[in-house]
Image (cartoon, rainbow, N blue to C red):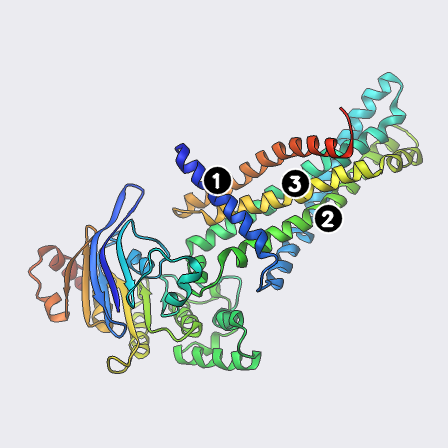
């Protein structure tokens, strides 16, 4: 792929993203499609998000309490687990899970529609394909990922508590007390601002890749894989950039 | 009037159409013949501006559609409707919802009127009993019938476009589909609805078309009526026709 093609694709992606956002405010509003997509992205992801988060919280708590025990500081397990989960690991891990489940689903569904000429049919019927197919997906992912992040953070903190209380033999109420201490404005905003951006990125990248599908089953595999890989890279890169920006905005220092 | 003027198109380095020119009227019944990969479906996609030509002009009622935006193309696309090879039905919707799709999007008719219209169209194509089935539960022939019904529901097209409508169907079902195509384009010109069918099935083409165009190496190498097609001197075309008629 040469630089010109790459730039043209980047331009197409930005145009699609902008049009999908504008579509939120323009008639017709595809409420049914948006609700269907929210159901797929949100409640449909509850189980996997809770499962992944629970084990991440348990593993993190185990690692931290072991290290802190050696220093005689294991009473701070709750604080460190809480900050790590809420500010950083929760939003990123849940976004990565979301990209794997929902992003790949969006790319493959739209890719199949392209290959099956269903997208062409929508254009023949005079419909705005971006508004009909992309806007509901972008909106649902942008709204549902923060909800999933809150649920996932809760599951991860619960997993952390289980290890702290039953493996590391710490006081459960002290653990939750420390979690309550770190629930301040800065930490909550740090943890909740990111999922909105991640949700938008995952959906817009996945829809763009899905609609760019060419060349049968092999093309579908390529577009789905690229959608997930690009989403993962963008989540990690954007996480760093957002962390820097939020530190700046919230007056936090490294 | 539809005019293709010296249209060329390449997918990457593969030149699909190389200076294609023809004109047709909205009441004409055309068949594009040719082997796989000769650009037959591309002609339909160009006509609907689903793909844009690399060079040349495509005029619909005198308007060059190649440079129009998606919103500007709406009034052009309303003049046509297309039935793709596999039907292109929305697989998450039932037959009823597929046929009602456009009417619901337009938001003009009430639900009762839509139901009545959908049943009427499905009755016309002979699959009213399958109204509640999902596309995956339909046979190939039924899928194409449902797709034709959906296309008819979209608007009042002046011309129907069919992409390989009989491919993969048994001879009896293929004949039924041809009868349906003829029924939808019945009447005398210029009052009837025209059709363009792209196919490699010469028998089906002979049943539904009055003018035949043969595509080879990205060019139209034959343009004429059925007797002209059957008595052609073009050896390649002769071979193509005989091979297919033998298979049938």
Tell me the quarter of the picture where residue A73 sits.
Answer: top right
- Of marks 1 and 3, the one in the foreground: 1
For the point 76% across and 29% down, the residue is: A60
For the point 65% across and 42% down, the residue is: A197
Q: Is residue A121 left or right of residue A89?
A: left
Q: Tell which subunit mark 2 falls on.
A: A
Q: Is residue A80 left or right of residue B162?
A: right
Q: Earlier in the sequence, mark 2 or mark 1?
A: 1
Dot label at residue B129: none
Q: Earlier in the sequence, mark 1 or mark 3?
A: 1
Q: Tell which subunit mark 1 falls on.
A: A
Tell me the quarter of the picture where residue B174 sits.
Answer: bottom left
Circle 2/circle 1 CB separation < 8 Å: no
- Residue B103 percent across, percent down from the top left: 50, 73
Q: Which residue is mark 3?
A: A95
Vertical side of A58 occupied by B4: above or below: below
For the point 52% across and 41% down, the residue is: A227
Q: Nearer the viewer, residue A63 or A95?
A: A95
Q: Is residue A113 left or right of residue B37?
A: right
Dot 1 surroundings within 10 Å: few (below 14), some, or many (20 or more)? few
* Element class at badge 2: helix
- Of marks 2 and 1, the one in the foreground: 1
Q: Which residue is mark 2?
A: A147
Q: Nearer the viewer, residue A248 or B9?
A: A248
Q: Tell which subunit mark 3 falls on.
A: A
* Element class at badge 1: helix
**Mark 3–mark 2 distance (CA, rounded to whole Å):** 11 Å
Q: Which residue is mark 1?
A: A10
The verdict on a common chain for dots 2 and 1 is yes
């Amino acid at each position: 792929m040469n630089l010109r093609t790459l730039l043209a694709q980047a331009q197409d992606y930005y145009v699609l993203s902008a049009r999908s956002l504008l579509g939120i405010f323009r008639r017709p509003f595809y409420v049914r499609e948006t609700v269907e997509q929210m159901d797929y992205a949100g409640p449909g992801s509850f189980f996997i998000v809770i499962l992944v988060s629970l084990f991440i919280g348990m593993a993190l708590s185990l690692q931290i309490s072991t290290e802190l025990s050696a220093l005689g500081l294991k009473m701070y397990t709750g604080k460190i687990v809480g900050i790590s989960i809420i500010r950083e690991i929760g939003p990123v891990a849940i976004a990565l899970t979301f990209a794997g489940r929902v992003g790949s689903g969006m790319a493959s569904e739209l890719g199949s529609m392209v290959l099956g000429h269903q997208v062409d049919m929508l254009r023949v019927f005079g419909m705005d394909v971006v508004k009909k197919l992309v806007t509901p997906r972008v909106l649902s992912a942008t709204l549902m990922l923060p909800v999933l992040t809150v649920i996932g953070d809760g599951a991860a903190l619960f997993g952390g508590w289980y290890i702290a209380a039953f493996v590391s033999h710490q006081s459960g109420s002290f653990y939750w007390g420390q979690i309550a201490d770190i629930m301040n404005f800065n930490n909550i905003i740090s943890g909740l601002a990111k999922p909105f951006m991640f949700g938008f990125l995952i959906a817009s990248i996945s829809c763009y890749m899905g609609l760019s599908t060419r060349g049968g089953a092999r093309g579908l595999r390529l577009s789905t894989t690229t959608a997930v890989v690009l989403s993962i890279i963008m989540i990690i890169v954007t996480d760093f950039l957002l962390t820097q920006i939020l530190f700046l905005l919230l007056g936090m220092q490294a | 009037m539809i005019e293709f003027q010296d249209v060329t198109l390449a997918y990457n380095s593969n030149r699909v159409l190389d200076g294609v020119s023809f004109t047709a009227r909205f009441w004409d019944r055309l068949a594009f013949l040719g082997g796989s990969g000769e650009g037959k479906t591309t002609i339909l996609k160009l006509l609907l501006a689903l793909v844009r030509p690399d060079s040349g002009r495509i005029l619909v009622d005198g308007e060059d559609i190649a440079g129009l935006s998606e919103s500007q193309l709406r009034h052009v696309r309303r003049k046509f409707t297309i039935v793709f090879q596999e039907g292109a039905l929305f697989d998450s919707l039932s037959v009823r919802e597929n046929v009602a799709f456009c009417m619901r999007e337009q938001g003009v008719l009430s639900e009762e009127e839509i139901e009545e219209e959908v049943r009427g169209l499905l009755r016309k194509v002979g699959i009213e009993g399958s109204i509640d089935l999902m596309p995956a539960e339909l046979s190939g022939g039924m899928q194409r019938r449902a797709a034709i019904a959906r296309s008819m529901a979209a608007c009042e097209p002046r011309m129907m476009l069919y992409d390989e409508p009989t491919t993969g169907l048994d001879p009896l079902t293929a004949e039924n589909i041809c009868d349906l195509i003829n029924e939808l384009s019945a009447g005398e010109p210029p009052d009837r609805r025209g059709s363009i069918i792209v196919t490699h099935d010469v028998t089906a083409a002979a049943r539904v078309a009055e003018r035949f165009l043969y595509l080879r190496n990205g060019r139209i190498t034959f343009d004429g009526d059925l007797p002209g097609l059957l008595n052609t001197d073009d050896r390649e075309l002769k071979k193509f026709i005989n091979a297919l008629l033998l298979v049938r």
